[in-house]
Image (cartoon, rainbow, N blue to C red):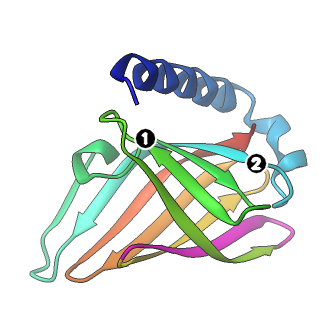
Amino acid sequence: MAMKHVHRLLRVGAAAAAGMLAAQGAMAEGLDGTSPLLCATQLAFECGPEGVCLTGDPGEFNVPKMISVDYTKMVATTIRVSGEQRQAVIANVLVTDTALLAQGFQGDVSWAAAIDRATGTLSLTGAGTGVSFSVFGVCGVL
């Protein structure tokens, strides 16, 4: 994928994320697992087995800034600045009155996500061999 195309996708994603932040109150209608979502990650924490945890921008920890979620296909897709596209399998989805919950796998990493249905706030955790992470952000309906 050409870098120009990737940068355009990231700009569009960033604009969409800004719009989602501005319209959080109206998002609850589509946060029920039936519509595709776009999530923007904002803050990440990464911890290792020695007990050291680091905080920073998600990109610093190889966590994508934008995540496209398709519950119909049960996949979450990311595109990195380098153009690399990744897909994570969504294994389980549960919709409660207040949250949209999902669990899945990507390579040798397992993850779980909770999206607040009223605000679109995202809490994402994951674990791989020798590392765990927590990521916070916001999601909205595409």
- Which tag, 2 or 1, sits closer to the chain's start? 2
Vertically, is 80 above or below 6? below
Element type where label 1 sits in the image: loop
Question: Label for residue 36?
Answer: 2
Q: Along the horizontal axis of the image, is 37 left or right of 105?
A: right
Element type where label 2 sits in the image: loop
Which marked residue is nearer to the observer: mark 2 or mark 1? Answer: 2
Vertically, is 135 above or below 56? below
Q: Quadrant of residue 19?
A: top right
Query: Which residue in the protein does label 1 denote?
Result: 65
The percent position of residue 75, horizontal first and vertical second, equals: 63, 62
Is residue 57 visible from the viewing direction of this image? Answer: no
Question: Counting other residues with Cα less than 10 Å from the Cα at mark 1, is it few (<14), some (14-19), or many (20 or more)?
Answer: many
Magenta-colored stretch includes residue 48: no
The percent position of residue 96, horizontal first and vertical second, equals: 83, 73
The percent position of residue 62, horizontal first and vertical second, equals: 28, 52
Magenta span covers which residues? Answer: 96-107
For marks 2 and 1, give the CA distance: 17 Å
Q: Quadrant of residue 7?
A: top left
User: Which residue is at a point 35% across and 79% down the rendered structure image?
Assistant: 108
